[in-house]
Image: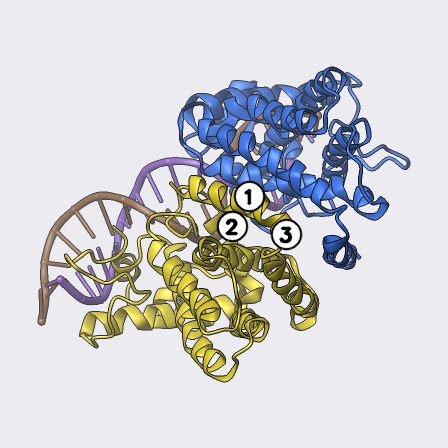
Chain colours: A yellow, B blue, C purple, D brown
DNA sequence: GTCTATAGTGGGATAGAC
DNA sequence: GTCTATCCCACTATAGAC
């Protein structure tokens, strides 16, 4: 609906970087919006100002973006794409599971940092269940899968030994953990989001410990229950 | 700021039911808003309609409520108060920890059910970090503590045996779990929110199992780490 | 299909008189 | 505390140019 659904289109963050004229206009609007949002904040930036800055008419801006909030989707996409790129470096560099996981999450924090000031606005929109920006919505299934895929790779290429069922599910659980980090990050006003970084630095070794603990016979039962529960939720 | 801060005022959901003229006007506006929100949804209800329904001018409505979203605070407060009342019954009736916990969470789902239709809107507002409605904000510290207190009682009065440090922290962790349930609930469109109820029915025994597992010597170390991490986060 | 220009409408929020 | 009048801006509508 919000994206072009041309038959077998792949669910990637960006529709496809074919540089048609329309795509250029679209991009100039996004760029203008990003500049103004960063400079003056979301609220104080009017659609008219964005259209002016982009050198297009107001009507044209609305031709490409159904609402002011739709422009925030661009932020989401941009972070997504940059994170995937940065993740590649991390996953090539690191082999230990904790380092891979921490690198992934820290890369996200680095990339999202410039947008922290108006991330609250984005978050607000994303929180609404009916919003296509909601991380749990059908519309964002593509980006969500792309993000989960990064965590899958972090697990796959590592030395982590796990029961098969948990290993299968772990990427999604890690993605969920990542959402929790994002929640914390949005509320984190410390300079450079240091508190979030500290949290990640402490939480990752813990996750690693916990993951390895699941192999103990005494806890296998509960782990099985958790796995079953998560499966039931997804259905 | 949003509430009267008269010196040693207790951080309770409702300021105090002294029936001055102002309080009556305020209440009539809230009542009107609730009626209209329930009948027509948040978006389709205008501030003008609310003011009309309450028999006051638009300006007067804004004298009492700084924004349309501030009216949602009333929903929050109402659920809070009703939940506390319902909780009392549960905590008197049940003695086993799982039953107490499940009773508490299910009572919340029962009470919040009428508001589910526009809870998404509320959630959206609450998600914004700068919003006083955010469950993590300083302004909602009172309600949050009141809610956490219910979980504290669920633990206290039960047969659950735990290490002292974890027992001290458990109420807040359970509150956090409850927030997770609320997140699920907001996205749950099944009739009567059956899926959320099913989730709770399965998750509570799991939490119970996990809590009891923490006493095993092998997992004590990790539990200690988790407790320390949570302490660090709160600071 | 892409874009402009212009003129609305609706509703959240505010100013200032009383 | 209450009102009336007004502002502002997201969004829509339309009619037409390329």
Depth check, front residue: A79 or B19: A79
Instruction: Determine which residue is flagged by label 1.
Output: B125
The numbered mark 3 sits on a residue in which chain?
B
Measured in 3D between alpha carbons, the distance from the residue under mark 3 to the one under mark 2, in whole angstroms, is 10 Å
Q: Between A14 and B170, which is closer to the camera in this rendering?
A: B170
Tell me whether marks 3 and 2 sit on the same chain. no
Q: Chain of mark 2?
A: A
Q: Where on the picture, by quarter, is residue A60?
A: bottom left
Q: Where's the N terminus of chain B, which quadrant?
A: top right
Mark 3 sits on what residue?
B130
Q: Position of residue A219 (x, y in %)?
A: 62, 49
B28 to the left or right of A26: right
Element on which disc 3 rests: loop
Outermost residue, bottom direction? A93
Look at mark 2 in the image and give the residue it sits on.
A124
Q: In the rendered structure, are the residues bearing label 1 and label 2 in contact, judged by CB atoms less than 8 Å apart?
A: yes
Disc 1 from disc 3: Cα separation: 9 Å
Whether residue B122 sits left or right of residue A135 in the image: it is right
Above or below: residue A32 compared with residue B180: below
Q: Kindly identify the residue that appears in the image at 58 percent across and 50 percent down.
A: B128
């Amino acid at each position: 609906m919000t994206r072009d659904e041309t038959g077998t289109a792949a669910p990637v963050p960006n529709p496809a970087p074919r540089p048609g004229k329309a795509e250029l206009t679209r991009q100039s609007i996004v760029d203008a919006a990003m500049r103004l949002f960063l400079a003056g904040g979301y609220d104080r930036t009017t659609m008219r100002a964005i259209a002016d800055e982009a050198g297009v008419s107001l009507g044209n801006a609305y031709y490409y973006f159904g609402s002011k909030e739709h422009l925030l989707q661009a932020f989401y996409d941009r972070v997504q794409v940059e994170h995937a790129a940065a993740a590649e470096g991390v996953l090539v560099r690191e082999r230990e599971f904790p380092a891979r996981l921490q690198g992934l999450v820290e890369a996200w924090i680095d990339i999202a940092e410039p947008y922290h000031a108006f991330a609250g606005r984005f978050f607000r929109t994303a929180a609404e269940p009916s919003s296509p920006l909601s991380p749990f919505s059908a519309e964002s299934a593509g980006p969500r899968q792309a993000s989960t895929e990064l965590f899958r790779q972090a697990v796959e290429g590592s030395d982590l030994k796990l029961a098969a069922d948990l290993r299968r599910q772990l990427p999604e659980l890690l993605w969920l953990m990542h959402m929790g980090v994002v929640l914390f990050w949005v509320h984190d006003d410390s300079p450079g989001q240091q508190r979030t970084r500290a949290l990640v630095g402490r939480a990752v070794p813990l996750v690693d410990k916990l993951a390895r603990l699941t192999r103990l016979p005494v806890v296998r039962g509960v782990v099985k229950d958790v796995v079953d529960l998560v499966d039931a939720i997804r259905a």
